[in-house]
Image (spheres, helix red, strand yellow):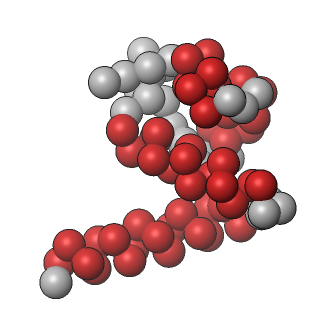
């Protein structure tokens, strides 16, 4: 399933501009056609929760990196 930025913003009830900022920081990355995959949706879900706690873009990057490393280790074990 792939959705575009407008649909993504509506789905998560966030401003489209905030989604664009996440793209600029390469926190979520659209494909060549401007769509988002399941990984981007999961990353945005996490970002929404963390941003409500006041986490900035740099913090979001660190948190997502740690989360994905942890998930990778869990799969490996």
Q: Relative to 50, does residue 19 appear above or below in the rendering?
A: above
Image location of residue 73, percent across then percent down: 28, 79
Considering every residue shown, the one lying at the far bottom of the view is: 77
Q: Quadrant of residue 59?
A: bottom right
Q: Identify the residue at image location x=77%, y=55%.
A: 52
Q: Quadrant of residue 36?
A: top left
Q: Looking at the picture, does residue 77 appear above or below residue 2? A: below
Q: Position of residue 15 (x, y in %)?
A: 76, 27
Q: Of all residues shown, which one is farthest toward the left?
A: 77
Residue 27 locus on image (x, y percent): 59, 49
Horizontal arrangement in the rendering, residue 54 relative to residue 42 (left or right): right
Looking at the image, is 64 positioned above or below residue 38? below
Residue 58 appears in the figure: no
Q: In terms of image quadrants, where is residue 12?
A: top right
In front: 10, or 70? 10
Toward the viewer: 26 or 40?
A: 40
Q: What x and y, as percent, mark residue 72?
A: 29, 71
Q: Quadrant of the C terminus?
A: bottom left
Name the one closer to the observer, 53 or 44: 53
Which residue occupies 59% across, 69% down?
A: 63
| Label tally | 0
Q: Residue at x 44, y 20 (%)?
A: 3
As drawn, 69 above or below 34: below
Quarter containing the N terminus: top left
Residue nearest the observer in this picture, 4 or 26: 4
Is any atom of residue 54 visible in this view?
Answer: yes
């Amino acid at each position: 399933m792939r959705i575009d930025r407008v649909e993504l913003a509506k789905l998560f009830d966030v401003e489209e501009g905030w989604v664009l900022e996440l793209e600029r920081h390469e926190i979520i990355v659209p494909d060549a056609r401007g769509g988002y995959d399941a990984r981007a949706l999961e990353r945005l879900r996490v970002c929404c929760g963390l941003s409500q706690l006041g986490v900035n873009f740099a913090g979001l990057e660190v948190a997502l990196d740690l989360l994905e490393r942890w998930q990778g280790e869990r799969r490996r074990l």
